[in-house]
Amino acid sequence: MSAKKTEKRPLFGRMRQALQRTGGALVRGISELFPGQRGLDALTLEEVETLLLSADVGVEATERLIAELKQTGGGRLREAEDVFAALRAGMLKILEPVSQPLLIPVREKPFVILMVGVNGAGKTTTIAKLARRFQNDNLRPMLAAGDTFRAAAVEQLQVWGERHQVPVVAQGTGADSASVVYDALQSATARHYDVLLADTAGRLHTQSNLMEELKKIRRVMGKLDPEAPHETMLVLDAGTGQNALAQAREFHAAVGISGITLTKLDGTAKGGIVLSIADKLGLPIRFIGVGEQPQDLRPFDAEEFIDALLAH
Amino acid sequence: MFENLSERLGASLKRLRGSGRLTEKNIQEALREVRMALLEADVALPVVRDFIEQVRERALGRDVMQSLSPGEEFVRVVRDELTHVMGDVGGELDLKVTPPAIFLMAGLQGSGKTTTVAKLARHLKEKHKKSVLVASCDVYRPAAMEQLETLAGEVGARCYRGEADATPVAIATAAVETARKRACDVVIIDTAGRLHVDDAMMSEIKVLHEAVHPVETLFVADSMAGQDAANVARAFGEALPLTGVILSKADGDARGGAALSIRQVTGKPIKFLGVGEKTDALEVFHPDRVASRILGMGDVLGFIEEAEHKLDRKQAQKLAQKIKKGKGFDLEDYRDQLRQVRSMGGVSSLLEKLPGGGQLPAAAQQQVGERELIRSEAIINSMTPLERRRPLIIKGSRKRRIAAGSGTQVQDVNRLLKQMMQMQKMMKRMKKRGGMGQLLAGLKGGGGPGMPF
Ligand SMILES: Nc1nc2c(ncn2[C@@H]2O[C@H](COP(=O)(O)OP(=O)(O)OP(=O)(O)O)[C@@H](O)[C@H]2O)c(=O)[nH]1
Ligand SMILES: Nc1nc2c(ncn2[C@@H]2O[C@H](COP(=O)(O)OP(=O)(O)OP(=O)(O)O)[C@@H](O)[C@H]2O)c(=O)[nH]1
Ligand SMILES: [Mg+2]
Ligand SMILES: [Mg+2]
């Protein structure tokens, strides 16, 4: 594909460089924010607030983190480093528990991953990334073209499948999504594939009929394997603001989300809303997407994520 | 969380009561609430700061209109200011050039560009009677070209398909050439999604722009976007001479503060909203509606004005009474409301203006077109007065009779009954929240018009 992606420094490459510049202890942005001996005065708090709000952390979570800073800090937070460390610790307390990798157990039948999310979040691309990842782990993936609605959604998945020699089960646009997924699971089971990745059409969580359709896909899978899907993955675009919380809540209520992938972290969006999602719903965060290519997927790492969020 | 700004302001505004003038002291707390409301709606922080300053200046020393409480006056100032900065009503597209008029789309990955191309093509065809050719310069995303080709087929636009190894510039120039030969009125050029920090991709689109000199360069952004929307819009605005903005995915429940950020940062008009995945889901941008949505209050004021013009007051008051009691809303009322709604441009345009209206059950939202209104009315007309008053008695044989009488199917009757029940539920909810009714009573000193459906 294009040369455009290779020329870019990936997100955490940028971050690491920033870290190196400041002697490894501090992200550049932070040290500029907290010069010298100023400690935790009102101005500093305002700067912390700005940092968090600008990262989509949201009013409520920001207020909480700052309240905590005030409490734990008090007189002890004299140096910028102390403020930063305390803030970081506060955030880590929220994100560490949800930082859970996706583990594929050895099992008789295929491990089924159902991808869900709003329109354009990156579901289909993330499937391509996951498929490649599984191949690298010597697992055999199969794909189900469950987006039977959007123009050329099936073709999009098929192109990815061809590029990486992954079979794609499809019926075409307009077919019943649940029946495509059912067929695919049947075929994956018969042919002993290790993982089935089921794509679905993007849908807004407010569209109740489409949320029903997702439930149906789940139900139908259950007929072949009562435990399927083994992972219901919500794909969130890091550029999304406070609405991501509503997305997580509604998708979780409808189909039970077991993992989140946060895409498009290669831009300048910070994805701070996952703090609220972690805090309120406790959903595991599995991966981050850092580009459009199959290799641009990394396991979610709470510390790395927080450092990138606090860098500017 | 608070349902809307009015609720949020509740406490601080109560304190304003009695004073006949807005002062630095009495608006301070209220301003803080507005700041929070805007941040919760995803307006970018620097934009929020500027806006709050503007409101402070506007509000200070302002005499409170007799008809309004100081709190209401303050809400009006905020809303008016927001509407003002959101710019004019959209919908304008520059077609006054020697054809073909060239449009170029730009935006982040997955923002809705390709879908919007199809929507614009359909809009130009249906509203402006233009012939449209579309072309995809997205040589990266798998099946991007197929996507556009399929959509073009759906909306009856020509689609120029470039060679497999053609560059974006080559595709675009060839598309324009083809349009010229075929005497197409408009060419819409779709582009690959790109990050604003991707230098190679940003220069690609700059070169593309220079090669085809579009008369419209449209930035497509996701209405669910957060704080970063301002950075992204700034970068696109600096790279390209944008002529307008289209906000996609406005059919969700995001408050859409990105609209304000983008508008402030680029200074370019917002022209359309994308309100669905289908090719007809494109709406002209209305600053007042979006402003109210950002504030989380529904277009209450605009709604009142419109309602005052068009509604039969007596009937509305009768209904307002019923809603307040949370019961007694029957199919007779429903029919009255259907008729009035029809005279006001359909349900959908009304619903979206109401707080919580966007979250109306899908079944209710589906019955929003003109045709559905007429059909619903026909169904109700075929009922006996008793049935209209007590819809619960409508069972199998009655349903069949009503369907036959109105030339519809039993499913249609079922749908109407279900919708009616949902309406009743929603009205009960509104009454509980005290939302609409209270607000109306408050704003108009009581006795205001009720809801027109
Ligand atoms: N920069 C960047 N772009 C991404 C990432 N993930 C996906 N994309 C791009 O985002 C766009 C949408 O991705 P898709 O995978 O088609 O999204 P989707 O959720 O399947 O979309 P629908 O099926 O239409 O709802 C494409 O242009 C992808 O290349 C990411 O991590 N970084
Ligand atoms: N609900 C809703 N979905 C929309 C709207 N506009 C676009 N979409 C959906 O959003 C997803 C992405 O739309 P695309 O048109 O493919 O976006 P794009 O900007 O061309 O994406 P890339 O080419 O990958 O950058 C698709 O699933 C569309 O159906 C809208 O107004 N409302
Ligand atoms: Mg997809
Ligand atoms: Mg596209």
Image (cartoon, grey):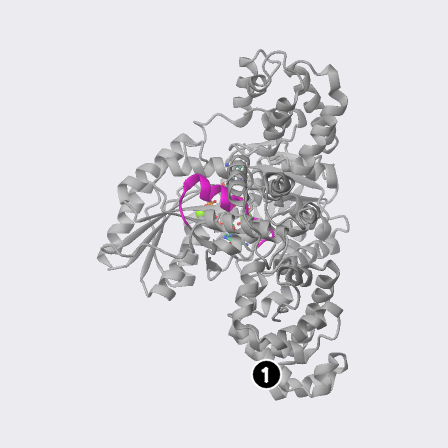
Residue A301, x across and y down, in percent: 66, 28
Residue A221, x across and y down, in percent: 71, 53
Residue A257 quadrant: top right
Residue B274, x across and y down, in percent: 49, 55
* Magenta residue span: B252-269
Residue A94 quadrant: top right
Query: Closer to the camera, B385 or A138?
Result: B385
Q: Residue at x 70, y 72 (%)?
A: B321
Q: Is residue B326 visible?
A: no
Apparent side of residue B212 relative to residue A23 in the rendered image (left or right): left
Q: Is residue B269 visible?
A: yes
Q: Is residue B263 magenta?
A: yes
Apparent side of residue B275 relative to residue A214 in the rendered image (left or right): left
Amino acid type at mark 1: Ala
Check disc 1 and report the residue beneath it.
B378
Task: Tell me the subunit letter for badge 1.
Answer: B
Q: Is residue B100 magenta?
A: no
Residue A182, x across and y down, in percent: 66, 55
Q: Is mark 1 within 8 Å of ligand 2?
A: no
Position of the C terminus of chain A, as image quadrant, is top right
